[in-house]
Image (cartoon, grey):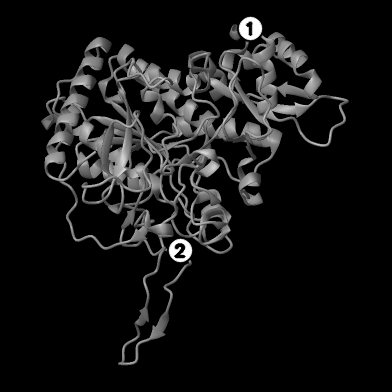
Amino acid sequence: MTVPTDVFTRHRVRVLDPACAVWYEGTKRPQSTAYRADTLLVPLRTAQDDGLIAELNKVIEPLNARLVQKLPRTDRWRLAMRKLDQSLPVPVALRLRAGAKADSMPDPWAVLALLRNELPTDKVAGIGLEHIVGAASVFGGGAPYGGGVPYGGGVPYGGGVPYGGGVPYGGGVPYGGGVPSGSIGLATGARNPVRVFLPKPPRRSAAELPAGRRPVVAVLDTGIGPHPWLKVGPLTEDPVVEVSEEFQELLAELESTMTAENGDTLPSLVSPFEERDTIQPLLGLTDSHAGHGTFITGLVHQHCPDARVLSLRVLHTDGVTTDASVLLALEWLRDRVQDAIDGERPDELVDAVSLSLGFYPENSDQETGALLAEAVRKLTDLGVVVIAAAGNDATTRPFVPAALALNADGTNTGNDLLVAVGALNASGASIAAFSNDGEWVKRWAPGNAVVSTVPLWQGSEAGDISLPRTIGGVQLRSGPDPDDLMTGFAIWAGTSFATPVIAGMLAAKLAAAEDTLVIADRISRATTALAETDKELLDKADRGWTP
């Protein structure tokens, strides 16, 4: 297995190799996963506890390792740390112990395994790897992972199936993409521009809705780009899309603090708006996942024009982030919803979260999934439905957070308001070949060859041929330009896009339901809306949508 060095450099990636990864008696051999090479996640309270950090460092001395706390020192973060849950996982730097001599840097997995082996559970609760998280869509064109074709060659990692053998990374690929468009015929449509001759979806005023307010769907993705259907603005202007400068600045300050400590080659996500060519700006290529968030927002809007989308930018334009960024976004949303309930401000509520991203954890036990499971549970306990993509690697290996809908042993006693979504082909009559599957995938929607909004951009690529017209005129005769997105619409594929279909359908049910600020009633309202969405899915199955 070979991964381009620019991916490792850009996101400081390390891959866990089950063949040589350490595991102690009484534990399970880990599966492969990808994670930051120089950090661990620890609870916020631990990151502020010098005594506990010193105790942890004493344990990991034999590995020539030490943990270094690096939290932002801005006024914004000082204020936030009074409000954020103290169990929120935040990254701490992993360094070589002072005076140590070594030929390689400490491995976060080896450090984590030793801590879990040597210390009681209460001392290591909430400590974990900072996993690499990826968008659950097939690769676009442009500059995916640093070179015009996915992973530098027409087929990923040099063989007709990702990573050259049946199941990527031993059962999934942490980027959630797996199958690029056109390889072995599994997917059609990888952000190819199309022309749409349809009017803008009609939208009622908030006062016309039975709820008396718009349902709000939070989309955690690459941000939002310019599009005439998707007006962005403050709540006072009743926008289609809301953004949060506060969240973006919190995330950017956390990212830049670790960048200053560990180095990085990508700018922090300080802006809520999509960027086009971050990876190869000298060539002007449109990055592989640029427009991903706008595409998802458009799908929510198509299924529920009355909804408002709260766009939180957590993914970079190559479709990669870490679970630290996702966990911060989920905790920020929890705090927003709780504040809205406590302050009786219904317009600031969030009703659903759409997550078109995930990763394959090193183990499928409760300990490994505890950080994300707890973050999701805190939202669903407030009546927020979380809808997550199942992943695109044609595997049954659990892809989290979607797979957390069931317990690790497969029993159906997980989180009823966490919805895992697999992808159907365009007709809805069959499961998309790339879609993950398993007992934990409970809902299905079309996600292959779907059409939605993209930012109005023009990249530097051109059609395969470009010839002067021979019968007068000045226009060229050309093949289609893959990154001429000025039509504002494209075709794409992935469970990334089945997920907002379900989110939009759910939002439409919530728009028709009476609103409430009572938490127990919010949970009941969400449960009822989800049941009504399931009934609609069954009705659609009679007309071709078959799980």
Q: Residue at x 18, y 31 (%)?
A: 533
Q: Is residue 238 visible?
A: no
Residue 84 locus on image (x, y percent): 49, 17
Q: Which SS class for mark 1?
A: loop
Q: Which residue has dot 2 on it? A: 459
**In the drawing, does residue 101 fall left or right of residue 386?**
right
The quadrant where residue 43 appears: top right
Closer to us: 150 or 249: 150
Marks 1 and 2, the one that precedes in the sequence? 1
Q: Secondary structure at mark 2?
A: loop
Locate residue 469 relative to residue 245 in the image: left or right.
Answer: left
Quarter of the picture containing the C terminus is top left
Is 190 situated left or right of 345 in this image?
Answer: right
At horizontal 22% and vertical 32% (from top left) the residue drawn is 507
Query: Compared with residue 223, is residue 528 higher up or lower down, i.e. above or below?
Result: above
The kind of residue on which mark 2 rests is Gly
Q: Quadrant of residue 470?
A: bottom left
Rendered image: mark on residue 390: none
Q: Which residue is mark 1?
A: 120
Above/below status of 516 relative to 154:
above
